[in-house]
Amino acid sequence: MGRGQKEASDTQRAKTNTLADLASQQASQLYGMALPQFQQLLSGGGYSPEEQASITGQSMGALGSAFDAAQQRAANRVARTRNEAGFTEQEDELAREQGRQAAGVTRQNTIDFANEAQRRRELALSGLTGLYGINENQLARLLGISGQLVGPRQAEGRGGGFGIGIGPLSFRF
């Protein structure tokens, strides 16, 4: 190898090492910032109790407003016609229907809260997968989480495989 080639090779190696060191530092910083956030998402469980109470309050408030308006229309009809026939039965039916609707809203909120918790766990697993460079099923098993959580993501083609590296420097096979 000639002297010029050796110097060019040394210069290129120095540039490559500098870029690799910079990438490693950036990856370490990203890893240090992202890991605690992903772990918090994984253990968080979805909406906070305050958020759940707010969502429930808003949905029940909207439901109550609708039934209050229907009851007011019935009362206005009685006042306008001065005929109370059927008013009590209508109030009873409105109350029964409001109870049915409230049960449906409560059921849907419960389902939505569970779905949000699962979505956040999947997001955390996906993020940790990128940090650790392993597939989601392996990561779920390591963390003691059911593989069923990551099944839908793998069915979409976003999971699985084998990865090497950390964060932006990872490669998937």
Image (spheres, grey):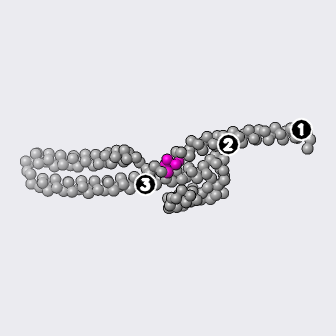
The residue pinned by badge 3 equals 115
Residue at position x 60%, y 44% from top?
A: 31
Element on which disc 3 rests: helix
**Label 3 to label 2: alpha-carbon separation:** 36 Å
- In the image, what residue occupies the spot 63% across and 42% down? 28
Residue beneath the point at 7% across and 48% down = 82
Q: Would you say residue 99 sits in the magenta stretch?
A: no
Choose the circle earlier in sequence order: 3 or 2. Answer: 2
Quadrant (top left/top right/bottom left/bottom right) for the N terminus:
top right
Q: In this view, does 27 lie above or below 126?
A: above
Q: Residue 68: x percent and y percent?
A: 21, 47
Disc marking residue 4: 1
Decide if residue 62 is in sight here.
no
- Residue 133 in percent (x, y) is at 62, 53
- The magenta-colored residue range is 38-42
Tell us which disc is closer to us: 3 or 2.
2
Amino acid type, mark 2:
Ser
- Between 43 and 164, the one lying in front of the other is 43
Tell me: residue 8, above or below residue 153. Answer: above
Quadrant where the C terminus sits is bottom right
| Residue with the mark numbered 2 | 24
Q: Nearer the viewer, residue 143 or 11?
A: 143
For disc 2, the neighbor class at 10 Å (few under 14, some 14 to 19, many from 20) is some
